[in-house]
Amino acid sequence: MAEQHSSKSIMWATIIVAAILIAVIYPLTANKGGSTATTSSAADEADIRIQPVARFELAKAEAPAASGPRDGATIYNTVCGACHNTGAAGAPKIDDKAAWAPRLATGKDALIKSLTNGKGAMPPKGGATLSDDEIKGAVEYVMGKAK
């Protein structure tokens, strides 16, 4: 018959095996430097590893410096077209002659004033930095297209 092992001997065998494993594994994982420089270096490395993948920053785009005032078509396509091509925020579409008829009837000076001061959802100067000549050119361009 096979000998039965007492639970006491199994317990001691387990403790001995655990002690041997600790004696082998601990020297491999112990920090050998132990200096604060190594510790701070490890902390810096950890900070670098957990940095976000990307950063997002909003900044106002700077317009390229122009040599002079831009023509009406350029102003319309870069500033006005976003709303007036689609009718966004109630803006009259450029090709909707019926919507432009009452506005054109007020005259060029009234349209220049509306563009300069803003009207409805349109901010002053269409939300851009425009000179008086550029505003005049944009109004003339729109008047020519809307007639």
Image (tube, rainbow, N blue to C red):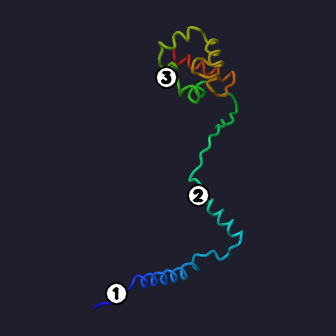
Name the spot of residue 37 as percent of width and height, x first.
Answer: 71, 69
Choose mark 1 or mark 3, whichever is in front.
1
> Which type of secondary structure does the marked residue at label 3 adopt?
loop
Q: Is residue 20 left or right of residue 45?
A: left
Choose mark 3 or mark 2, whichever is in front.
2
Which one is earlier in the sequence, the residue at label 1 or at label 3? 1
- Measure how far apart labels 2 and 1 are at the Cα level: 54 Å
Disc 3 marks which amino acid? Gly
- Measure how far apart labels 3 and 2 are at the Cα level: 46 Å
Q: Is residue 20 above or below residue 70?
A: below
Name the spot of residue 90 as percent of width and height, x first.
Answer: 51, 20
Choose mark 2 or mark 1, whichever is in front.
1
Q: Is residue 55 left or right of residue 3?
A: right
Name the spot of residue 31 as percent of width and height, x first.
Answer: 63, 74
Disc 2 marks which amino acid? Ile
> How crowded is the residue under tag 2: few (<14 C-alpha within 10 Å), some, or many (20+)?
few
Disc 1 marks which amino acid? Gln
Q: Which residue is outermost to the left?
A: 1
Check disc 1 and report the residue beneath it: 4
Residue at x 53% of width, y 28% of height: 82
Residue at x 62% of width, y 23% of height: 123
Check disc 2 and report the residue beneath it: 50
Check disc 3 and report the residue beneath it: 87
> How crowded is the residue under tag 1: few (<14 C-alpha within 10 Å), some, or many (20+)?
few
Name the spot of residue 139 as percent of width and height, x first.
Answer: 60, 18
Q: Are marks 1 and 3 in contact (CB under 8 Å)?
A: no
